[in-house]
Amino acid sequence: MQKKVEIIAPTIDDAMEEAVKKLHVSQEKIFINVLGELPEGLNCEALMDVNLTLEGKRYLEGILKALNVGYQLEARSVGENQIYYNIDSNENPLLIGIKGKTLEALQVLIRNLISTYTKEKIVTSLDIGAYKSNRTHQLEILATKTAKEVAKTKIAVKLDPMNSYERRIIHEKLSDWRDVYTESEGEKEERAIVIKPRN
């Protein structure tokens, strides 16, 4: 990923200092090109060249090393705007946390890191020990089973509270059903899906 900003500064050192502030990266990742001289100083172009996938991988490695856990970390780009990370560790339960809370927090951290480099929408996904794929499968089974029950009995069913990622899975799974529809109710940690019968 490349990013450019134009800077006018008295010296190259001042231009570099300003570029670090504007681009939110260290000096090693910035190249300064002097375009010309102006009465107020040097007209410079600061170019940031960063591999987002690699930056995210290094960040996750730092966290994993600080936790002192053995791990394997896969990092790959999928197309232009998608990055996928998968961790397999001897401490998967610790890294996943209760109901996936630690995994969710790690994903927020990695998304925040990536967003400091670009304003483009980059879909960043993190999984640990196939937790998300297994959880997706479990949620799809739950959605189907509950939807069949609601369609048969015509009585709405409220599921346990879930995070936005898990609620989205349920909504998507049941979006094409003719007999039922889904709504989210509640606030923050108590937000849950209600599967309701159609008239």
Image (tube, helix red, strand yellow):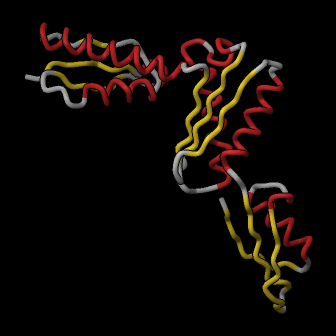
Relative depth, front residue between 142 and 15: 142
Residue in the image at 77% along x and 71% along y: 46
Using residue 25 as the reference point, say whether residue 134 is left or right of it: left
Residue in the image at 46% along x and 17% along y: 135
Residue 89 location (% of width, % of height):
70, 18
Viewport quadrant of the C terminus: top left
Q: Residue furthest bottom?
A: 39
Residue 190 location (% of width, % of height):
44, 18
Viewport quadrant of the N terminus: bottom right
Residue in the image at 60% along x and 19% along y: 129
Figure quadrant of residue 164: top left
Relative depth, front residue between 35 and 49: 49
Relative depth, front residue between 67 and 15: 67
Total count of labels: 0
Residue 170 location (% of width, % of height):
34, 24
Q: Residue furthest left?
A: 199
Relative depth, front residue between 126 and 101: 126
Figure quadrant of residue 109: top right
Q: Is residue 165 above or below residue 76?
A: above
Figure quadrant of residue 96: top right
Residue in the image at 74% along x and 68% along y: 47
Using residue 84 as the reference point, say whether residue 174 is left or right of it: left
